[in-house]
Amino acid sequence: MAKLSPMMEQYFAIKKKHQDQILFFRLGDFYEMFFEDAKLASKELELTLTGRDCGQEERAPMCGIPYHSCEAYIQRLIKKGYKVAICEQMEDPALAKGLVKREVIRVITPGTIIETSMLDEGSNNYIGSIFCRPDGYGLCFADVSTGEIQATQLSAKNYEEKLINDLARFSPSELIFNGDFLEQKSACSFVKDKLNCSTNLLDDEDLGYQDSEGMILRHFGVSDLAKISLDHKPYCQMAVSSMLYYLSQTQKTGLQRLLSIQFYHENQYMNLDLIARRNLELTQTMRTGEKRGSLLWVLDRTRTAMGKRMIKSFIEQPLNNAAIINKRLNAVDELYREGVLRQEIIYSLGGIFDLDRLMTKVVYGSATPRDLKSLQSTAEKIPSLCRLMEPVKSQYLREIYKNLDPLEDVAELLQKAICDDPPAMVKDGGIIKEGYHAELDELRNLVGHTKEYIAQIEAREKEKTG
């Protein structure tokens, strides 16, 4: 059998670690797929299947897409239930000696999408983690695009109905679980027939069973589980650690965006099963499955993407606690009575971009120059919002006011550093303003005035040498 070419040997070495994923292998300005991945992608994406010399008699089946327009293709694959491994060139091909070094920098799955173009701005995109035992379960939901984590534990027999209600409430697009979950037949049927989500069975090793506590302590930077209220919750601890393990394997970087855990208990929200949710038409109608005509459609007059997600979560998770309900109602009542303040706040919120998802892109290093400009624009609007909120009296609004960071330092940095009309991509250059960085200004001057610079060197050398 003929020997594979060095590049194809590299491809197979990487593909071996990502057998259940479609490998996007970066070659110049394209992501290429080979062999079975190419056949699958060409069928699903309607791409032309070609071939490439691979060192053997038969050419390797191949198809490719431009890397700068890959998101639409990835979205189509994710919607069909596939996972995509992004394999990048880790060095400049022009400077590389021999074969360009490549490695997978991220695996995109239904529950780990952070790209704005692939997400609904009005909905959270949750990935769920379940750790089951016969006498209880731990449950963890994370939205990687916003940095939100919610978790709970129930220690009781016959808990299956409550587990199903939790899954219905969060409706995750991806679910990871341990083997004991398969014993919950009704819950498994619910996931398969109703949730339409991607599923992943992990064994104890993958769940981080041996070092679950250490994994959590390292991630959140604490010395004791009690400091994050995770002590005495062994099943919840396992659900959280398995989530962190899975995300570390797929995302590689950016997990620092998951800053804290919000815990909820079984009586905190009204227990509504899937049938009740559908009949009440909370977020979509029964007949068409559209938002129009639902309770959310009637109530949603929010001005920001963050507000859209919040009001949807309020509707999907009705509170049971009278004190918290009244706290919300008091805030609503104050804004209802203070009509001028309400209108000023509405106006101030206009033009505020999706700060949650912008910050995630910054943490992942995938923010474009225009994303940074959107971040600057949003940060510049927050101080005026803070001033408007200063006289509020209700407890809920006072808490919001006290927790508002005006982000003046962020706005100032971006205003000084980023040009007023930045390009779409970092590779296009011309992002940093003149005067921000002396060395960069000097290098730009060299590029733009090469002849003058050479003439100056020539003049100096003539004078020096005679």
Image (cartoon, helix red, strand yellow):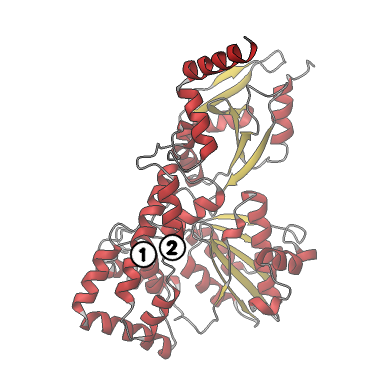
Amino acid on which the number 1 mark rests in the picture: Ile
Q: Can you tell which mark lies on residue 221?
A: none
Q: Residues within 10 Å of mark 1 (few under 14, many from 20)?
A: many
The residue drawn where x is 70% and y is 12% is 57
> Residue 261: horizontal and vertical position, in percent?
58, 71
At 44% from the left and 70% from the top, the residue drawn is 274
Give above or below for 328 relative to 170.
below
Percent coordinates x, y for residue 314 in the rendering: 39, 73
Tell me the residue at 56%/33% (across/down).
Answer: 40
Is there CB contact under 8 Å for labels 1 and 2? yes
Q: Residue furthest top?
A: 466
In this view of the protein, can residue 94 be seen by the observer?
yes
Pick the quarter of the image with the N terminus: top right
Residue underneath mark 1: 382
Residue occupied by mark 2 = 407
Where, quadrant-wise, is the C terminus in this rendering?
Answer: top right
